Image (cartoon, helix red, strand yellow):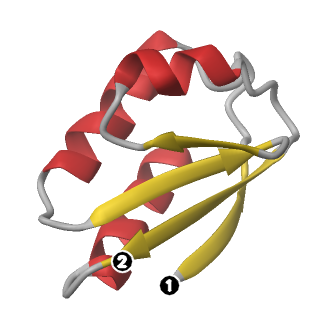
Amino acid sequence: MEKTILIKNTAGLHAELAAKIVHAASKYDVDIRLVYSHVTIDAKSILGLMSLAVPRGENVKLVAIGEKAEQAISDIEKVLA
């Protein structure tokens, strides 16, 4: 499953937001990746997420594979909203 999400946070994808994404993603036994600017990162890796330095107003794509992929993407989308 894939979903494109707009980063609305004024600080972009910063450390606190990355930690919340990792927390949400880690609740599920799914392979979940975040894609930005042709770079794919494991959504369960805080350092990987922070290395993307996604600014406000940019789109990222979540890609999840597994039994609860849809639920995992939905939870991460709530964190990013």
Instruction: Judge left or right: residue 81 versus residue 76.
Output: right
Residue 78's spot in the image, x, y percent?
44, 58
Instruction: Judge left or right: residue 66 versus residue 65.
Output: left
- Residue 22 lies in quadrant: top left
Which residue is denoted by mark 2 in the rendering? 65
Which residue is denoted by mark 1 in the rendering? 1
The residue lying at 60 percent from left, 15 percent from top is 51
Up-down: is 7 above or below 16? below
Instruction: Judge left or right: residue 10 versus residue 49.
Output: right
- Residue 43 lies in quadrant: top left
Mark 1 neighbour class, 10 Å CA radius: few under 14, some 14 to 19, many 20 or more? few
The residue lying at 87 percent from left, 39 percent from top is 57
Q: Which mark is residue 50?
A: none
Mark 2 neighbour class, 10 Å CA radius: few under 14, some 14 to 19, many 20 or more? some
Residue 36's spot in the image, x, y percent?
75, 43
Q: Looking at this view, name the residue that lies furthest to the front.
A: 39
Q: Earlier in the sequence, mark 1 or mark 2?
A: 1
Q: Nearer the viewer, residue 11 or 34?
A: 34
Q: Nearer the viewer, residue 55 or 8?
A: 55
Residue 80's spot in the image, x, y percent?
54, 46
Question: Mark 1 falls on what kind of element?
Answer: loop
Badges 1 and 2: C-beta atoms under 8 Å apart? yes
The residue lying at 48 percent from left, 54 percent from top is 33
Q: Nearer the viewer, residue 22 or 63?
A: 63
The amino acid type, in three-letter code, at marker 2 is Ile
Up-down: is 26 above or below 69? above
Question: Mark 2 falls on what kind of element?
Answer: strand
